[in-house]
Amino acid sequence: MYDFQYHRPKSVADAVAALKKAADGKLIAGGQTLLPTLKMRLAQPTDLVDLSGVPELRGIKVEGNAVVIGAMAKHAEVSASAEVQKAIPALAMLASEIGDAQVRNMGTLGGSIANSDPAADYPAAIVGLNATIKTNERTIAADDFFKGIFTTALKEGEVIISVSFPVPEKAAYMKFDNPASRFAMVGVFVAKLAGGVRVAVTGAGPSVFRVKAMEEALAKDFSGKAVENIKVPTTGLNSDIHGSAEYRAHLVTVMAKRAADAAK
Amino acid sequence: MAATDAKIHRLEDARFLTGAGRYTADLPGKDALHAYVLRSPMAHAAISGVDIAAAKEMDGVMAVFTGADTAQLGPLACPVEMTGRDGKRYIEPFRPALALKEVKYVGEPVALVVAQTLAQARDAAETIMVDYQEKPVVADVRRAAETGAPAVWPDAPDNRSMVWEKGDRTAMEAAFAKAAHVVRLQSHNNRLVAAALENRAAIAEHDAASGITTLTTPSQGAHLLRDLLCDKVFREPREKLRVVTPDVGGGFGPKFYLYAEHALLVFAARQTGRKVFWSADRGETFISEAHARDQFTTGELALDQNGKFIGLRLHGLANLGAYISTFSPSIPTTGMAKVASGLYAIPAIHMEMHCLFTNTVPVDAYRGAGKPETFFMLERLVDLAADKMGLDPAELRRRNLVQPQAMPYRTALGFTYDSGDYPRLLEEALQRAGHGGFAARRKQSESTGKRRGFGLSCYLHGTGGVADENSKVELESDGTVSVYTGTQSSGQGHETVYAQGVAKLLDMPLANIRVIQGDTARVRTGGGTGGSSSTIISATTIHQASEKLIERLKLIGAHLLEASPADIVLERGNLAIAGTDRRLSLKEVAIRVEQNAVPEALRGPLAGEAKFADQILSFPSGVIACEVEVDPQTGDTRIERLVTMQDVGTVVNQALVDGQMHGGIAQGIGQAMVENCVYDADSGQLLTGSFMDYGIPHFRDLPAMDSATFSTASPNNRLGIKGVGELGPNGAPPAIINAIVDALSGEGVRHIEMPATAARVWQAIEDARR
Ligand SMILES: Cc1cc2nc3c(=O)[nH]c(=O)nc-3n(C[C@H](O)[C@H](O)[C@H](O)COP(=O)(O)OP(=O)(O)OC[C@H]3O[C@@H](n4cnc5c(N)ncnc54)[C@H](O)[C@@H]3O)c2cc1C
């Protein structure tokens, strides 16, 4: 790890100010992605702005027909939250399957989606539930947030405050683990929402994506049968030592079918 | 708890489980300098210059060493003496502590920076400019074996260190000529890392007054490291170096070997006059600690019309990596040959092994050491033969097992199995595994869209290692007993088993016995721990030493209690006259001897010493039965049942035997299902350089294991012990793969390579359907 200046602001405004002042500042949330990167000397920020002391970023609450989760909510908090379990059990389940207990006790929702790992779980829920991301500057629709491998719509110095997840009629997330990292080889989030059906896939491509053909089929008949023969093209899908693009494409169909059948 | 209780809890566990263990990285203290090893990012390159000028000027930097500084040192040499089929010793390139003019694998040490903090050492290392000229790379063992492949070493024609043969080729060929059935398999035994919890580390400190340097490092035997460092690297008397090994967090083979860092730390401590500390991080471990397996083998099994095995042929390409590591030539050769016959009577066997250089981390023994490679091939061949002949795999095995009355059995390759009851192992394993009910369970799985398979593996181990053992058992003046031994625990529980033997003979509480290991200054000799033989080596020698101590104590007791030595007994920590209440505690005895209250002839240390006087070889054996359920939609495979029956000779401690089986099988499951070291074939870069890409079994991947043991004592040592440590990884992989292939036989799958990840299992189904 290289040397850096450490800041622990008490408000979002102070965090933003600290970032602005820094030559090359970086936010740190749970540190589960950033700290290993720093330890391996793959990044050299001049300043780290720790968000753990900012109360505005905490908490989980139901607001109307949505569950609003603070950016600093830990995976363990989301999975254990009675509100989330009641309103969107699929989201609580998703959080409970991220990493291991240590990671879930430190890693945060905001950190996960800001990082936009192609195999991360949360992006599937964000897009699958058509969530809205609130930052210190604006709100961003789910479909506009993830821009590609490790890239998002966030601008320099923009801080995620919270994410608002509409409560679906029913939803489920099916994850198939990568055998080594245990991130998602493929994860499919299926939801029936007031505004329609969504099918969001993580792990298979450079970034989370929707499968329109499955959404249309499920809109007509919300069952596994409706999607079991819908294949996604292999072009552009990830292919590595853990699985071919063909395998991932195949898993998208299997996981979508199982998610549709499991949705509640 | 009585010392004879076979389920005694491990004495060392309280220490380990409460954080009181003391590992090397706990010990450097605040005054140590920190060393950082700059490693080659290239798999094969010439070095035309290393510029350290800037690094030397950096904050906190105390010294920077390159190959030019260590050029006077001797090689990290291999002590194994063996010859290939041409009668010549295997080719061993000079392995320097720091690269001289070229690098041969990614991770090879190029420079050592010593600074006040690790961060400063790393900062300085980043400023070192190395001029590399890339050379053609070969990382894959099959590619290395081809004519025209890039040469790793100019002096090793066709990349061969050695071609090794064993067995009667003519007899084997005759068997194949008359065979009714022949099955053949080509398979790559996947490359692994040991992944011990504790990374390698070292502390070196030079004492100018005595001229002795102390190297503290995790090891599997302090003496081997001292001897290699003194004899080969520093070319100095062995008194100049003391090697100390504190608690070790997992060895499994790779902690046995001599590494560049051992030599470099001693060198740096002498050069700087300061205590120097180094510890690998996990990423460094992946590219610097010996890898394992990586063998491409062709096996053929010949059977007569009744399914009797009549011939076996093994032709293998073994990847040794870029250099010869401490034991590596013996692994794909004698390590395999010992057990090539499996539990079967096979009259003709021939092996031809090509030991190859590649631009990869050196490969050496890892738990199993040649045996897992052998059994994977043999036990897959047996299943393929059963499939070909339409026989139940259990029945085919039954027909070929060596029978108890044939013991001791000499294999076609000349090794003698000491004792065993293989049919009993097989039948009891089948019984415990509920083999009879399998068909019903398979139906049940199929009703939910799953596939279920049953797999067996019959296997053994041939214990080996180095028995340079002088044990000492000494009564201290406080009445406790110190036991000195030259084997080395890396977590197995030696402190418990060795103490058990002494406690039993001296009839005293376990808590009063301490086992001292891992210090060349306190333990005279030692062969270390490897080859599943530590209890054979140490327990038998400690037994002898205890008997000598007892003899001495009885003479002293006879004098002090005024009785005949024949009437003196050891009873609950006392010397007593048998059948009377006249007794003296061992503490009193020790004090009396110290005060010279005994005649001249009986004075001196109250110790018994002995040299290893038994045979190291034994053949523990086992049968594993495994049942898996496969989800054909995803390839996801769960191990539903795993039963292991083993004969490990006399059981000293059942809990330790079970623990060894559980851990070993977990590692076997790792090899069978997730673990795989992958190099990029063109660049020689390690693609699986962290646990993000190198899969390791998690707790939830492991089944509840049913481990059961019976004993046929080994006639080869006085206690009847056979080894247990390596059984699990030897036997588990083929049982698992046999079960998976069985599950998918209906889909037309005939073989699956390891690791059988879900992706591979799914692909195998797809390929069979096409
Ligand atoms: C062993 C291990 C296993 C894991 N397994 C999984 C898994 O199975 N599935 C999975 O999805 N993830 C997994 N992860 C990743 C984990 O979920 C991380 O916690 C997550 O990716 C990052 O969250 P964090 O809070 O730790 O963020 P940090 O590491 O602190 O930050 C990550 C990035 O987000 C930025 N950032 C943080 N907070 C904000 C904010 N409020 N606004 C804007 N930018 C912000 C930071 O600047 C940084 O660039 C695993 C991690 C580990 C170490």
Image (cartoon, rainbow, N blue to C red):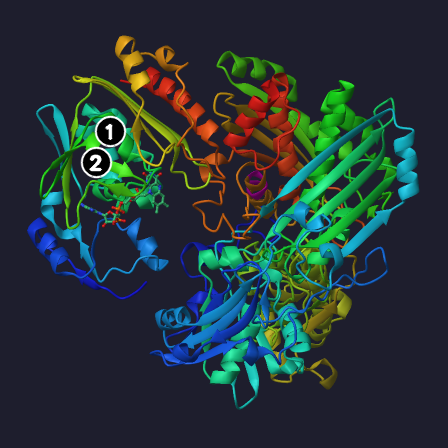
Stretch of the chain drawn in magenta: B665-669
Which one is in front in this view, the residue at disc 2 or the one at disc 1? 2
Taking the image as shown, residue B184 lies to the left or right of residue B674, namely right
Dot 1 alpha-carbon crowd within 10 angstroms: few under 14, some 14 to 19, many 20 or more = many
Is A261 situated above or below B420?
above
Taking the image as shown, residue B638 lies to the left or right of residue B552, namely left
Q: Amino acid at mark 1?
A: Val
Asked if both marks, 2 and 1, belong to the same chain, the answer given is yes
Looking at the rendered structure, the number of numbered marks drawn on it comes to 2
Quadrant in the picture for the N terminus of chain A = bottom left
* B668 magenta-colored: yes
At a point 27% along the width and 26% down the height, the residue shown is A90
* SS under mark 1: helix
Instruction: Identify which residue, B56 or B661, lies in the foreground.
Output: B56
- Residue sitting at the far top: A220
Q: Amino acid at mark 2?
A: Phe
* SS under mark 2: helix
Q: Marks 2 and 1: CB-CB under 8 Å?
A: yes
Whether residue B621 is visible, yes or no, is no
Residue under label 2: A145
* Numbered tag placed on residue A69 in the rendering: none
* Numbered tag placed on residue A127 in the rendering: 1
